[in-house]
Amino acid sequence: MTELPPEEGVPVWIEDGHSARRSAAPWGGQVANRIRALPEGKLAQEATAIWQRRRLLLNQLRSTFSRWLGGDGEMSPPVNRYALHLVVILMAFGVVTVSRFRLPEVSVQLPAPTAAAESESPITTTVSSRSSYRPIHNTTLLFQAPVPHTIIPERERVGIITYTVQANDTLWGISEAFGLQVETVAWANPAVEADPDLLSVGQLLNILPVDGIWYTIKSGDTVEKLAKTYKTTVEKITGLELNGLAPPYALTAGQKVILVDGTKPAPKPRTPYYVLQIVGTPPKGAPVGSGRFMWPVRGYWSRGFTWYHYGIDVANSTGTPIYAADDGYVALAGQDTWGYGLQVILEHGNGYKTRYAHLSKILVKGGQIVKRGEKIALMGSTGRSTGPHLHFEIIKNGVRLDPTLYLPR
């Protein structure tokens, strides 16, 4: 057996900056024992040479660590610098690696379009757009394709169409949708003209292609007379192809024509008509409200408070009683023009006011003192309304507030 030199101290661990690495000593002892067990000869000589090189390498590491590490075990400035460089290199390597990573491409095969199936009987489709209601007759089944948004093209209508009133429709909204004046829609529909407040869901309205009056010819009418009476021109009336007029423009009783851009005289006030009463000075003994409001009506929720709807709507049947939400006096009562309809405004003397609109009947008058819970009106559908309901507002110092924040839950 070949004897190896005895172990010398090697730096294998640093404790308090002075001791060597002891954890490597057991490993070194095991290697030495295995080499000592080898037979004599060349293999033993090579093992001895390897052991000498190991000791030389350990001595070199010892001197290197001695230069890099201070006496107290802290890292010297060169080590700090090399560590920082290593971190930067690792970060750059990570960025490059991530930038070269590519997600796998997925190929989706869409089915090829198929020809439309033929239908045995013609199909009639009613266009539900307010701007156009035309029947479409075709023998081919149509399938709607998905589109990101819907564009209603602007087309000049050449005929009179009908429109079915839908929930939440108003005469003003319908007129705007078709690009017409409110009066044009009202004049083309006698029931609406008689009472614009009675617009109802499912009602059919005649919609003209242009602004004007849909007029029924009477005996003795002439184009010149109609143009003068309804403040339009002969050229506008005869120039509309839909009227079918040709020189000498003879008219027949019962014939219907459109008096383009014509206007009617102002109608007489409907009866009963509530003159709008406005009270600027509080009456003597006017109470001051508590600021705690009660629900003014029973019904079901119809519409809430938004930035463009400054109140809440509670629906019920026509004639449902409306009550004062707090003590106060009647600051305004009467007929509003085309908006709130019949309405009442109560002044509560503490900065608050409450509005009750679209009434069918008013039971109080301007300047009258009312108590909380007192019946002041009946529910209706006057003004801009498509069904019986109460529009209720709470106003504080001129600012309309969300009533649900002030009513009991």
Image (cartoon, rainbow, N blue to C red):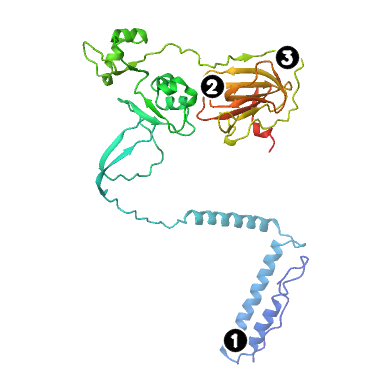
Answer left or right for 378 relative to 23.
left
Count the marks: 3
> Measured from the top left, where is residue 218 in percent x and y?
31, 13
> Measured from the top left, where is residue 334 in percent x and y?
59, 17
| Image-quadrant location for residue 379 | top right
Looking at the rendering, in which quadrant would you find the N terminus? Answer: bottom right
Q: Residue at x 56, y 88 (%)?
A: 42
Gap between marks 1 and 2 measured at Cα: 114 Å
- Amino acid carrying label 2: it is Gly
Ranked by sequence position, the earlier of labels 1 and 2 is: 1
Does 114 sit above or below residue 342? below
Residue 283, which numbered label?
3
The residue to which callout 1 is attached is 45
- Amino acid carrying label 1: it is Gln
Q: Which residue is drawn at 51% across and 20% down?
A: 338
Q: Residue at x 51, y 25 (%)?
A: 384
| Image-quadrant location for residue 246 | top left
The residue to which callout 2 is attached is 339
Label 1: few (<14), some or many (≥20) within 10 Å?
Answer: some
Q: Residue at x 62, y 84 (%)?
A: 48
